[in-house]
Amino acid sequence: MSVKSMQARVNPVYLTAKTAVCLMERAKIPGAEEIACALALDDKALLQNMKDEETILGNALVVEAKYRTMCRLIEASGIMTSVDLPCGYTPKAIYMTEHGRKFVGLDLPIVIQEIEPIIRQLAGQAENVTFYGVDATNYSSLKAALHDVSGPLCISTEGMMMYFSDDEADTVIANIQCLLSEYGGCWITPDLEYALQFCGTFQAVFGEESLAKLMATRDTAQGQSAVVALGNSFIIEPTDIPASEARAEALLARHGLKAKKINLGEHMPELSVYKQLAPEQIVRFKEAMRHCHYWIITLDETKGLHDTARFMEEQPFAMEYALEKGILHLSLCGRLDTISAPQLLLVWEKANHGGNIEGIRIDCTQLKYISSAGIRLLLEIQENCGRPLGFSGVNAKVKEILQQNGLAELNES
Ligand SMILES: C[S@@+](CC[C@H](N)C(=O)[O-])C[C@H]1O[C@@H](n2cnc3c(N)ncnc32)[C@H](O)[C@@H]1O
């Protein structure tokens, strides 16, 4: 199995970014067609669950409004370094460099390997563009990516926060808080109100038929990400806006952050997709977007600086293994996440060649954290192994994560 297919197996969510660039191509966003062509994207396969052309149109409308408004807000921040986390396959690097900015594109390694050479070909100012493979939940990877970048940073997050568990969202917020403490700048994201933007858009444009089209959209995102919930305590729920807003604000406050909400309807530029809509649909859409906000998040200076020391102690991932009488003994160190999980998958595939592993014992004494990519892999291994995985030496955090995911058979010996 290639490195690429191992990366894809531990975290398939990158497929959602391929869908996004297909939609950007439909919305005639400059550069999207060239990128989709260089990636040889098959938009029929990627968009297949969006059953009709109208559902695709609704999605293109959401994506174009988001992309163009975000570019505008990044420019309006006045900050000259745009850090896109996650950058996906969008043409933002091209736009930002054409508009005099430095661009740092961060995403999972599988995405960066594909997009970097394409953008280097297409972007005129390729020296102002850098790309790094990271995992947003892994602070060391973010820090390494930004080692030669100077602040302030305008960090943009489009289409990522909803794919995380509560715990991962909390970790990413803490990581961004650390970056803002160190580099200065701001974090801009439409993600908190993504569901409001989708519901408002589809309701405005398709009226009573919007529900079925929203369901098809959700099924596509869930299918491509292998994530069921598409929400966490950072994300605003359309069914309870005041309470979920208060919860998200409290979460930010716990990390020494505060938010200013920017009205989408007031800041959205004219969109190309309007050509495919009737005038009354456009009026209703613009009105609906007045009920959505993008959040600009900054350090709350009144709260003082957050403790960043916990990150300084991060150990790099390491793994030892031995096979004895059909039992695979593993010892894991550091973080099991999207970046490190392919190494474990490789060992598992090698050791289990011929299906002769009867059990697995994992020594977690040095293991600090497991992200959902790590959990996905452990569940897959368990399914193929027959016996429940045995864990020993787990810390409180790892124990909680394992138990939440039904990997609770902890063998404390
Ligand atoms: C819906 S796409 C959005 C991409 C891009 N911002 C856009 O608007 O098209 C979600 C992206 O999040 C990235 N992603 C998911 N989990 C991540 C993680 N833990 N760290 C970094 N990127 C991640 C995926 O690889 C994918 O590119």
Image (cartoon, rainbow, N blue to C red):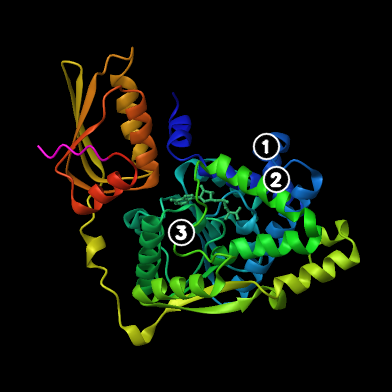
The location of residue 183, given as percent across then percent down, is: 39, 72
Quarter holding the N terminus is top left
Q: Nearer the viewer, residue 347 or 51?
A: 51
**Left/right of residue 354 with respect to residue 77 in the rendered view:** left
Extreme residue in the top direction: 354
Tell me the distance, in whole angstroms, between the alpha carbons under discs 3 and 2: 27 Å
Q: Disc 3 vs disc 2: which is toward the camera?
A: 3
Circle 1 residue: 41
Query: What crowding class fits label 1: few (fewer than 14 Cα within 10 Å), some (14-19), or many (20 or more)?
Result: some
Q: Amino acid at mark 2?
A: Cys
Q: Give the residues in magenta.
A: 408-413
**Which mark sits nearer the N-terminus, 1 or 2?**
2
Dots 3, 2 in contact, CB < 8 A: no
**Which mark sits nearer the N-terminus, 3 or 1?**
1
Dots 3, 1 in contact, CB < 8 A: no
Dots 1, 2 in contact, CB < 8 A: yes
Tell me the distance, in whole angstroms, between the alpha carbons under discs 3 and 1: 30 Å
Q: Disc 3 vs disc 1: which is toward the camera?
A: 3
Residue 22's label in the rendered image is 2
Extreme residue in the bottom direction: 302
Q: Nearer the viewer, residue 324 or 404?
A: 404
Q: Nearer the viewer, residue 55 or 405?
A: 405
Dominant secondary structure, magenta: loop
Circle 3 residue: 232
**Left/right of residue 158 with respect to residue 147 in the rendered view:** right
The location of residue 221, given as percent across then percent down, is: 59, 46
Q: Amino acid at mark 3?
A: Asn
The location of residue 361, given as percent across then percent down, is: 19, 30
Residue 394 lies within the magenta run? no
